[in-house]
Amino acid sequence: MRVENRKMEGDLKVSDELTLNGSVSSTTTVTSGGYLILNGVVGQDLILEKDSKVELFGTVTGNIYNRGGELIIHGIIEGALYKNAGVIVIHPESKIKGKIY
């Protein structure tokens, strides 16, 4: 698994296994087969495509769009959560400030 401990500018596409301890300034997309462990911050939206997986321990300042992935939430979502497809597990310690659709 790849580990990033830095600030990343621009959009990020995750197609492999990544642990992000830093931050991404823009939108992050996890593609099919991708696996993201987010301990840091996504500055805009997080998109899960079909057959992707995200474990959220950090913060997403925008919205999350689940389009067929597996999302496990322990952290903070400052925007809304859109479940178009896929699986979402919301743990008690998580905080979702926006609406769930």
Image (cartoon, helix red, strand yellow):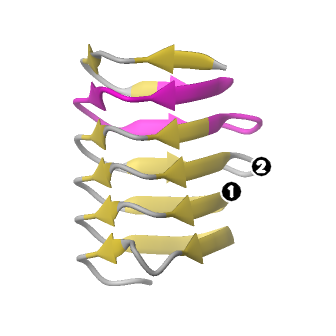
Q: Are marks 1 and 2 in contact (CB under 8 Å)?
A: yes
Assign the N terminus to one quadrant of the image.
top right
27 vs 49, left or right, is left
Tell me if residue 43 is in the magenta stretch.
no
Counting residues from the N terminus, which is met first, the one under dot 1 or under dot 2? 2
- Rendered view: 85 above or below 14: below
Q: Which range of residues does the magenta coloring cover? A: 13-35
47 vs 33, left or right, is left
Question: Disc 2 designates what residue?
Answer: 51
Residue type, mark 2 in image: Asp
Give the percent coordinates (x, y) of residue 24.
29, 29
53 vs 98, left or right, is right
Label 1 crowd bin: few (<14), some (14–19), many (20+), radius 10 Å? many
Q: Measuring 28% from the left and 30% from the top, which residue is drawn there?
A: 23
| Residues at marks 1 and 2, CA–CA distance in whole angstroms | 5 Å
- Rendered view: 98 above or below 65: below
Task: Give the structural element (helix, strand or loop) at label 1.
Answer: strand
Q: Measuring 29% from the left and 18% from the top, which residue is drawn there?
A: 8
Q: How many marks are shown on the rendered structure?
A: 2
Please identify the quarter of the rendering in which residue 7 is found.
top left
Q: Measuring 31% from the left and 64% from the top, which residue is drawn there?
A: 77
Assign the C terminus to one quadrant of the image.
bottom left
Q: Measuring 77% from the left and 36% from the top, which residue is drawn there?
A: 33
Question: Disc 1 designates what residue?
Answer: 69
Residue type, mark 1 in image: Gly
Q: Which of the pair 57/78 is nearer the observer? A: 57
Task: Give the structural element (helix, strand or loop) at label 2.
Answer: loop
Give the percent coordinates (x, y) of residue 96.
32, 75
